[in-house]
Image: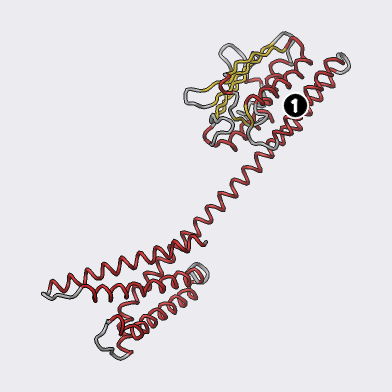
Amino acid sequence: MAARLLLLCALVLVWWTLNGLVWTGQVMGMAESTGQTLPLGPVLRMELASAWLWAPLTLGLFWWVRRWPIEPGRILRALALQWLAVALVIVLRALAVLAFNDAIGWYPELPPFTDILGKSVLNNLLMSWLIIGVAHAWFYAGRARRREREAAGLESQLAQARLQALTAQIHPHFLFNALNSIAETVHRDPEAADRMLVDLGAMLRYSLDGSRRKQVPLREELVALDHYLGIEKARLGERLQVEWTIDSDLLDADVPPLLLQPLVENAVRHAIAARTTPGTIEIRVARGDDGQLVMEVLDDGAGASSRHDVGTGTRTGIGLGNTRARLQCLYGGEHGFEVGPRDNGGTRVWLSMPCRMSGAVA
């Protein structure tokens, strides 16, 4: 507020100084056109004084408009108050002539006050209303900027709340499925179940730490994903084969926590768990031609058309639907997300996002 007030004062002073100089040039030019020669000093003094008298009056009118603006619901009252302000300006300008004429020299000999007041009406009525109009524009522009900032803040808070809710949704979903996997394994293979619990503990630590951060380095995401795959490999054995193709230059790229795990879990459930023969899941991370960070999760299962949560129909599940919503919250139109069949059978989940390295300024 203080900075805005200082800016307004500076603009008002500069504006009226420029007006005084322009008025001086006009008076001198008119005199020369009629063959008269006027001394520059007295003309400059009178015109600058007339202009500078407007500076405090302008600030007063701005304050008046801010206090009682013309707006819906109280137009008549506000108009009456603006007319009152205009009348005060006219009277104050006339009184200023009486007070400072000896020093400035507007009149060689002061006329009656009624004459001065009448001339003040002619000279200052329109100018007062012009200033009131400008003050309203300044007032409403400031109000619009404040509302834009408030709306942007609310939108940011809403997006953050939605992102936190989406991230929180993943945690119980993953935990429930992981515990189910351990429960299926604990009686037939206690050692495998023990390894699964170790991996689950690491995943939970990562999950809790990730819930406090919007972005994590890709290397942390891949380590957590490896723990998850350790749980599934202990349950599925040789039926689950995993291939990694990771660009090592991108290990410090920022990604949302638990971004890949729901996608891989979806592939495990639909492409691997229901079959008796070995199946393969491929995880690829590379930089796209446009500089975006590109991730892919591919499987050799039955194909995307057999799934219920691919995000293209009415039955969007937590895995892909949640990922799509989180990417939209974080990146808006800067991300890409596609789910579809592979040419040689199976399903391909493809996503891209801005490639930002950890510690870099976005």
Q: Name the residue nearer the viewer: 84 or 274.
A: 84
Q: Name the residue nearer the viewer: 53 or 300.
A: 53
Question: Horizontal placement of 100 versus 339: left or right?
Answer: left
For the point 57% across and 53% down, which residue is it? Answer: 150
Examine the image and state in which quarter residue 119 appears: bottom left
Q: Name the residue nearer the viewer: 110 or 158.
A: 110
Q: 187 above or below 107?
A: above
Q: 166 above or below 40?
A: above
Q: 45 above or below 263?
A: below
Question: Horizontal placement of 196 versus 222: left or right?
Answer: right
Residue type beneath disc 1:
Met
Q: 301 above or below 252?
A: above
Percent from the top left, x then y, of residue 353?
Answer: 55, 30
Q: Which residue is mark 1?
A: 203
Percent from the top left, x then y, of residue 168?
Answer: 72, 36
Percent from the top left, x then y, of residue 344?
Answer: 58, 11
Question: Horizontal placement of 63 versus 315: left or right?
Answer: left
Residue lying furthest left: 35
Percent from the top left, x then y, of residue 278?
Answer: 71, 9
Work out whether residue 315 can be spotted.
no
Local SS, label 1: helix
How busy is the neighbourhood of tag 1: few (under 14 within 10 Å), some, or many (20 plus)? many
For the point 81% across and 25% down, which residue is it? Answer: 179
Examine the image and state in which quarter residue 121 appears: bottom left
